[in-house]
Image (cartoon, rainbow, N blue to C red):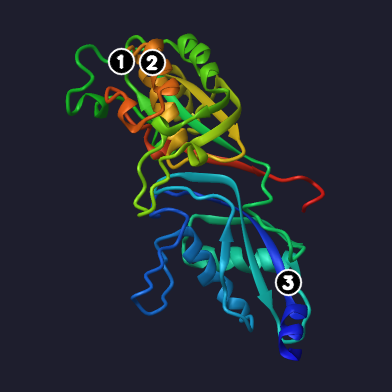
Amino acid sequence: MVVVGRALYNMHRYLLNISYIGTTFRGIQKTVNKLERSRLDTNSIQGCLELALQVFHPTNEIHTVLSSRTDAGVHALHSTVQVDLERTNGQPYDTTILTGVLNRTLNKQRLPIRVLSSKLVANSFHCRYDATGRTYLYRFAVAKDPPLGDCSLRNRSFETFIPIEEIDRCYFLQSSSFDIKRVQAASRMFIGVHDFRTFMSVSRQKVSRDHPMFTVRKIDEINIRPGETRALSSNAILAAETYNYWDIEIRAKSFLYKQVRRIVGALIALGNGRIDERCLYQMLTIPSKNSWDHRVLLAPACGLYLCRVHYRETDI
């Protein structure tokens, strides 16, 4: 009992605010194979962070907890991870040093992960369950003068200019009749409480979650605004002349598996004229995997960013 009490006393919980480019990773969450020997999954953001944390040599085994899960190719401007660390002297790590050493370690490995800040939090704090909401950003660009002819031809979209700085950072569309006003108006359908079963991709997990108690969600806000290129110098001028950039921001307490990418994909299909508002309404009001309209394409992961995880100020 004395040992347990001492361990609890020496353990401190840290909230890491992180950002990353997800292009080269399989996703944020590490893979755990119970049949194999314990190993670090360095194809995931979580695995790379746990490897970097080993430079502090805590006396406990390192296990991070994620506030949000993102898939392969999805980026984060601001996400959060918690970790408990124990030192032999019982003192907490200096959070400024913690941030700096982690970033130096990640930089040495040429990993596109950045720790924005570290904070000591109460041991009762939980980065996932105490989150009050999450905001996602989806960036896409529509060509002002798309090439003539069928844009579905194999090389058509590759013949057009795309700024090198935006590769895997934005979704580029070659559409001759994209209607952004129609998209903005239709996006209001998704606000509020709905059963988003149609907009949930089937995950690999064995337990079925195809039930309203799992699939009902409330979307608090959807905002579609003009965006801007992230290109530089002459590329920025050419990009602005070639494309109209748009940002879709969606905020909710939580989201289903690939829900944001499915919503964005449906809105883009509407803007392209592949579907109409009636199809969108049916997918939303008849919740079923069979209601998904297969003319709608899943929005590519490259345009999606986890923008922010929200907490009450009193919790952190």
Counting residues from the start of the chain, the first of labels 2 and 3 encountered is: 3
Q: Is residue 92 above or below residue 27?
A: below
Per the image, the residue denoted by label 3 is 12
Q: Amino acid at mark 1?
A: Arg
The answer to whether residue 235 is visible is yes
Counting residues from the start of the chain, the first of labels 3 and 1 encountered is: 3
Instruction: Provide the secondary structure element on which disc 1 rests.
Output: loop
Task: Residue 21: give x, y in percent of width and height.
Answer: 48, 49
Q: Who's the residue at 47% across and 48% down the image?
A: 70
Between the residue at mark 1 and the residue at mark 2, the CA separation in whole angstroms equals 6 Å
Q: Is residue 48 above or below residue 184?
A: below
Instruction: Provide the secondary structure element on which disc 3 rests.
Output: strand
Name the quadrant containing residue 33.
bottom left
The tag on residue 274 is: 1
Marks 1 and 3: in contact by CB < 8 Å? Answer: no
Q: Who's the residue at 45% across and 44% down the image?
A: 74
Between the residue at mark 3 and the residue at mark 1, the CA separation in whole angstroms equals 53 Å
The tag on residue 270 is: 2
The answer to whether residue 165 is visible is no
Badge 2 crowding class, 10 Å Cα cut-off, few under 14, some 14 to 19, many 20 or more, is many
Q: Amino acid at mark 3?
A: His
